[in-house]
Amino acid sequence: MVDQLLFGERFEVRAVEGDWLRIAARKEAYEGWMPADLGLLTTADDPGPRFVHSGFLGMLEREGDALPINVTMGAELPHFKPDTHIGHLEGHPYFFNGDFEPFETRSTAFAAEAALDFLHAPYLWGGRSIWGIDCSGLVQVAFKRAGRDLPRDAFQQAELGTVLGFVDEAEPGDLAFFHNPEGRIVHVGLLLGDHRIVHASGRVRIDRIDQTGIFNAELNRHTHALRFLKRLA
């Protein structure tokens, strides 16, 4: 899987082949294929004020659908009215049953707390949901809940913020980036304070971190080599 879109996120259609769409997701324009019946053609440029699903799992009921839709954390609710829990997609109303919050800037510590909601979710390359998520997807969705749109990949996220010198300087929500033997950024996690980090490796987990990198107590060794720490403004 190249990437994963959550409910309510927009994409651009690049090609149509039978029942499949070749799409570009978000501003990074990552391209991949999806079944055509999972998307909805929209003509509206403005989806209204942004609301994000903040709970573990929500249910969305659309008019004419036999079954509700499972909506995972980080999904967006287009044209949504919070007082009635009702929104609409191209004129078709839907009712959302779940927790939500406005997309507004919060602290990086809030993002760290949001990441903890994914604890023990399995690792999935390209994933961005509780059913499977990768390291940069975890960071991206956690910061989305904090009202910040971050790039998709770890090496892109590494271009943001201000470099910190030492792990002892880190505060909750600071980001730690890790490199492979060739020096390429291949992993990212969120600092929690007290030399702890939440990251997706096998599953979303909490490990210790020092100036060498991530120390996995179960394996009794360092598993990721620290490149640098960053603090987002």
Image (cartoon, grey):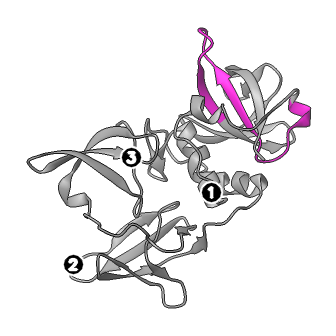
Q: Which mark is residue 62?
A: none
Q: CA distance from mark 1 to mark 2?
A: 30 Å
The range drawn in magenta is: 167-188
Q: Which residue is mark 1?
A: 117
Give, as a three-letter code, the residue at label 3: Ala
Tell me what residue is drawn at x 59 percent, y 46 percent: 150
Give, as a three-letter code, the residue at label 2: Ala
Eyeballing the image, is 127 above or below 168? below
Q: Is residue 12 left or right of residue 109?
A: left
| Residue 103 is a magenta residue | no
Tell me what residue is drawn at x 76 percent, y 25 percent: 228
Q: Earlier in the sequence, mark 1 or mark 3?
A: 3
Element under label 1?
loop
Q: Which residue is mark 2?
A: 66
**Residue sitting nearer the eye, 115 or 19:** 19
Q: Which mark is residue 25?
A: 3
| Residue 176 is a magenta residue | yes
Q: Earlier in the sequence, mark 1 or mark 2?
A: 2
Looking at this view, name the residue that lies furthest to the right.
Answer: 168
State which quadrant residue 219 falls in: top right
Q: Work out which quarter of the rendered image holds the N terminus and state it.
A: top left
Location of residue 5 in the rendering, given as x and y in whole percent from the top left corner = 39, 52
Element under label 3?
strand
**Residue sitting nearer the eye, 146 or 117:** 146
Q: CA distance from mark 3 to mark 2?
A: 28 Å
Looking at this view, name the residue that lies furthest to the top.
Answer: 182
**Residue sitting nearer the eye, 1 or 157:** 157
Q: CA distance from mark 1 to mark 3?
A: 25 Å
| Badge 3 density bin: few <14, some 14–19, many ≥20, Cα 10 Å | some
